[in-house]
Amino acid sequence: MPGKGYFILYLWCLVNFIVSSGGFKAQRCPAPCHCDFTSLSQEIVNCSYSRLRALPLEIPIPLNTTVLDLRYTGLSEIPPHAFSQLEGLKALYVGGNNIKHFHEDSFAGLWNLELLDLSPLHPDMHFDYEAFPTNLFRDLISLKILMFGRMSSSAQIQQGYLDQTLAPLHKLQQVTFPSLTDGDTPFGRGYNNLTSLKTVGFHGVGSVTNIRKHTFAMLKNCPIERLAFISCGLDTVEYGTLSSFPHLKVLDIEYANFMSVTEAEKFICDLNNTSIEVLHMYHIFGWRNWKPNVPQWIVSANTFQCLKHTSLKTLELIRNRIEAIDLQNFKFLPHLEYVDLSGNNLLFGLENGIQEIGFDKIFRDLMINTNLTLFRVDNNIYRTSLVTPQDIPSKSFWYGRPKLPLEPAKYSYVSPTPQTNRSAPHNFRLELPILKINLPENLEYVSISWWATDRNDYLPCDTFKGSVYFFPNKLRYLRIEDVNLKTFCALLYGLDRLEFLDLSYNGVNFLPKPFFENFISLIYLYLKENNLGPLIAEGGLHPIQLPHLEILDLSVNKISTIPKDFFGYLVSLKQLDLRDNRISTLSFTMTNLLSIEYIDISTNQLTALAISQLDYIMKMNASSLDVTLNMSNNPMDCNVCDGIGFLHLIIHSNMTTIFSNDSTCYMNGSKTSLESSLSRLERECDSSPHTIISSNLWLSLGASLGVISAAVCGLIVAYIYRWHIKYHFFLLRRHFRKRGVITATPGHVYASYDDNDYYYVTHKLLRHLEDEDQLDVIIDQRNFIGGASLSEAIVEAVENSRKTVLVLSESYVLNPWCEFEFQMSLARGYQSVIPVMFQPVPFDAMTKSLRKYIRARGYIKWTEDPDGQRLFWKRLSNAIFDENNILVQPEKDDTTELM
Ligand SMILES: *[C@@H]1O[C@H](CO)[C@@H](O)[C@H](O)[C@H]1NC(C)=O
Ligand SMILES: *[C@@H]1O[C@H](CO)[C@@H](O)[C@H](O)[C@H]1NC(C)=O
Ligand SMILES: *[C@@H]1O[C@H](CO)[C@@H](O)[C@H](O)[C@H]1NC(C)=O
Ligand SMILES: *[C@@H]1O[C@H](CO)[C@@H](O)[C@H](O)[C@H]1NC(C)=O
Ligand SMILES: *[C@@H]1O[C@H](CO)[C@@H](O)[C@H](O)[C@H]1NC(C)=O
Ligand SMILES: *[C@@H]1O[C@H](CO)[C@@H](O)[C@H](O)[C@H]1NC(C)=O
Ligand SMILES: *[C@@H]1O[C@H](CO)[C@@H](O)[C@H](O)[C@H]1NC(C)=O
Ligand SMILES: *[C@@H]1O[C@H](CO)[C@@H](O)[C@H](O)[C@H]1NC(C)=O
């Protein structure tokens, strides 16, 4: 039947067509390239670093390609219309090839191209119309970003900077040029047409450049906001040059070569007629004849006076050999939010040209009446050889401001009014004298590290016995590394929002006992390379009680003994670093390390992990231990009988244990090798692990990994009852404390509230309960008049009251102190908590336990209606006086915490 034959032939042709057009299955990827067609919006063909002989390729580049990378593929030319069929192409990379000039039609037809990256250009290339013909970019009407990249210093630059070639790029927003020529090559009139151009960068090769006023005159019509000169020379810049950039907001200069301080300061002054907001100057004085051309920069008083009409927000003067800065300058810059003076030789400040002692003064002046958010002065030391490369401050122009190395604050309790008084330890008995410090209102980040100084007694213990009190502030990050801060005797109050504290490399050997207790929001604590070992051993530091702490670094601290409870309150801790100390026994409890993921005890003196607690391991489900323990570089031996118990543990638990390669405990990634040594040991030693309690030295070394895992058992229980434990701990502590007892008189009611609700508490609650119901009400603002810590005062007050009234509100549920008060009241008695709501609070915002409590017990709701209010007070009084409920002890089956 001919019909059927035709049909088959037709089918065959159709299949052929589909296959050849590549439309049936996935598109075919050109041979040496890598393709990614998985994304819906992007079809990437990446041929970079593979050898393409020439274009076009044997397998055509898929028509739908949006990103094409042809860098370093050995191409020597781009033939005319090479990409004309790629109508959807958005980004094209062709640098690093042997192309010395482009054909007029090399980029023809790329109507939709948005990014063209020609960098790096061939070293022999000139920046002229032969290499970049006038019509080269004719079709690129959508181009937004154009990158030329560097050229060798011998390359010539065409008069006009290829203005005719660039003129058609009406949508161009960003361009990086290869270089600036020395002398008198102005930009041509074609640049008048670039009315979208916002960002211009020059990447030179460090040649000598003297810029004249007319050089950039044609750029005046471009709305240029960001400008960068990187390795461009810049020996002299004629005054008035920067008037060509009236819209300039961000200026970055890196590796310039200013002839003199006067040249540099004149240049700064020239910014007066721009809209400058961010000024970044990095290494602006070079070298000449093996000598620094400008050995030091003393930033004189009027340097920044010219900029007093601008709103400069960011000032980064990094690695510029600044020896002193006249503090007068900061008075001209009231909008400064971000100051970085790192990598200089800054040792003193000047005041009207007169040398001032030390840099404390610099801080004091900077900190007063400024709008700083970030202040950084790292690496200001003479012997720059001491600065390791990673300490050199990073450039921030192209990458934005340095990110705070913080995760988003999980516990921030940002209230509408930043001036919350709760943080202030009101009438607490601070040690006298009290040094009161007012930080700039918006200050969040301070880093003052690696500073050469002889001082090691900032607040010397013999002359300064007292406290430092910070007025309400937003400080989140404080890094003070290596400033020789040996002893520190003051207690710091008021840094309630601090999340990151780094005091590493200071050789600190003394801190007041409760030093860390006031940093209630701390998440990261780095105390590397100090000398805290003896202090910790002697109990000279209270156990660290920071409920939100996740990372604690105590490496290299000469620690040999750690008191049992030292890590007993770190329920959120994820990483504990005890590297490089002198620990021979693990004597501390880990019961409360509920979140722990990684413990590093490498490079210590652990000889073995005793097994006296092995019974525990057997009883509990050790396999669920999900923690990595780094034990490398300890003198441990797994080849002796006493190692059996420990071997058992690592084989049968999920715990990951790391040993040095040459250790007999080394596992080589699998546990099977250990299993064989275990069975060998069990044969040879002829005993079960339970009976290997020898008189061996190891045992006397006390605690052990066994203890760790045993502890995990208790830990779950401890977690469930953690608030009760805390409550009783505080009670006990108060009991033993001779002085500083809180003198709250026994009352009927303790009111727990956030400062934002102070109005309700004083005007409604207090007025009614005290005046009409004749009740004694304890509130913190009024009744806390002494004591060592707020926590204890709260426990005291809770203990002394029949009931705790929680004044719930949106800010209440975000305030960790309020949560603390709730938990403490709960720990006192399940029935002694009375939640009231003056405003609706979304249930989602509450902590689980609070939500659960309210679901179970309900709450009393305020209303604006007078009848409703009468009912409210009646219900509240009933709840307070309910005889049946007074002083109910926590019940054993109280499951409030089990969630
Ligand atoms: C190419 O893109 C068009 C539209 O963007 C789409 O309809 C077509 O399926 C794509 N072809 C292939 C082979 O992906
Ligand atoms: C192509 O691959 C190289 C490495 O193989 C990579 O560095 C480059 O970023 C890729 N290009 C694109 C456009 O993703
Ligand atoms: C530049 O703009 C001028 C006037 O707007 C116009 O006459 C000229 O053709 C443009 N040049 C190019 C190359 O587009
Ligand atoms: C800055 O602008 C003012 C007026 O706008 C002008 O008088 C002054 O000469 C300009 N300064 C420079 C350096 O161009
Ligand atoms: C700075 O610019 C302002 C206005 O832009 C002008 O009034 C002032 O004279 C200028 N100062 C200098 C020193 O050029
Ligand atoms: C101070 O900084 C804040 C943001 O950090 C800004 O909103 C405010 O306008 C600044 N005030 C002044 C006077 O510049
Ligand atoms: C908070 O402190 C300020 C002064 O520091 C004071 O004026 C204000 O009344 C206080 N607010 C409360 C609720 O105590
Ligand atoms: C032990 O780890 C494995 C893999 O990580 C996991 O599948 C298993 O559930 C863990 N066992 C326990 C008891 O957690």
Image (cartoon, grey):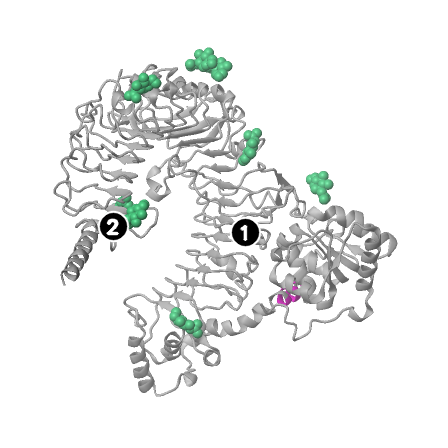
- Of 296 and 593, which appears nearest the observer? 593
**Which one is nearer the viewer's eye here, 131 or 244?**
131
- Does mark 2's beta carbon lie closer than 8 Å to ligand 2? no
Q: Is residue 237 visible?
A: no
Residue 647 placed where, x, y %?
36, 76
Q: In what quadrant of the picture does the C terminus appear?
A: bottom right
Magenta segment range?
724-732
Crowdedness near tag 1: few (<14), some (14–19) or many (≥20) residues, C-alpha within 10 Å = some
For the N terminus, which image quadrant?
bottom left
Of helix, strand and loop, which mostly describes the magenta segment?
A: helix
Classify mark 2: residues with Cα within 10 Å, few (<14), some (14-19) or many (20+): many
Give left or right: position of 267 versus 8. Answer: right
Residue 809: horizontal and vertical position, in percent? 68, 52
Q: Is 729 colored magenta in this rendering? A: yes
Disc 2 versus disc 1: nearer the observer: 2
Identified by mark 1, the residue type is: Leu
Q: Amino acid at mark 2?
A: Cys
| Image position of 561 (left or right of 780) | left
Task: Residue at the far bottom: name it.
Answer: 686
**Element marked by disc 2:** strand
Whether disc 1's CB lies below 8 Å from ligand 7 is answered: no
Residue 265 position within the rendered picture, expressed as x and y whole percent measured from the top left: 41, 20
Q: Which image quadrant for residue 160?
A: top left
The numbered mark at residue 35 is: 2
Q: In x, y percent, where is residue 203?
A: 28, 30
Q: Nearer the viewer, residue 704 or 816?
A: 816
Q: Residue at x 45, y 18 (%)?
A: 273
Q: CA distance from mark 2 to mark 1?
A: 59 Å
What secondary structure is marked by label 1?
loop
Residue carrying label 1:
511
Q: Residue at x 84, y 55 (%)?
A: 870
